[in-house]
Image: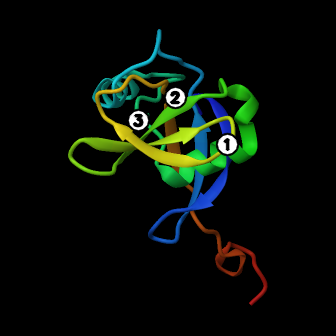
Amino acid sequence: QGGTFEGLRRNAEGQTVALIRADAVPAGPLTWQAAIDWAKTVQAEGHADFTLPDREDGRLLWANSREAFEPTWYWLGVEYSSSGAWYQYFDYGNQNTSRKGNELRARAVRRLILQSFDPSSAAGAPQ
């Protein structure tokens, strides 16, 4: 699916989402907008729908795979204000905001919405 499976979470609509972390890493730290633009260019195994993680993704990444990150700050794809955006700190796990012009690290993720399955509606299911 284009990277490493990081876990499951619920989105704002209550759907179950599988989080996939891309193996791609930018050459160095980027401003927030450059990180957003870089994530859009990531392609893996035929998938090109990568973005920066949102705040919930950041928590899941820190909880499940912090060893895959340097113990430093990584941009999240969520604005705080017109001049600031959120980041995930992969040492202690906290999130905070920074000026968008600062250069931080970045990683890209994609999300798969998992379809629910009702076994009672399957062919041959007992009625």
The image shows residue 109 at horizontal and vertical percentages of 51, 36
As drawn, the label of residue 62 is 1
Q: Nearer the viewer, mark 3 or mark 2?
A: 2
Q: Nearer the viewer, residue 26 or 24?
A: 26
Q: Residue beneath label 3, please? A: 49
**Marks 1 and 3, Cα distance to the nearest angstrom?**
22 Å
- The residue depicted at 20 percent of the width and 46 percent of the height is 82
Task: Please state which amino acid type lies under the numbered disc 1.
Answer: Trp
Q: Most extreme residue toward the right, as rendered?
A: 126
* Percent position of residue 22, x then y: 56, 27
Density class for disc 1 (Cα within 10 Å; few <14, some 14-19, many ≥20) is many
Along the line of sight, the residue nearer the viewer: 20 or 99: 99
**Dot placed on the residue nearer the N-terminal end, 3 or 2:** 3
Residue flagged by tag 2: what amino acid is it? Arg
* Label number found at residue 107: 2
* Residue 111: percent from left, percent from top: 51, 46
Q: Is residue 25 above or below residue 113?
A: above
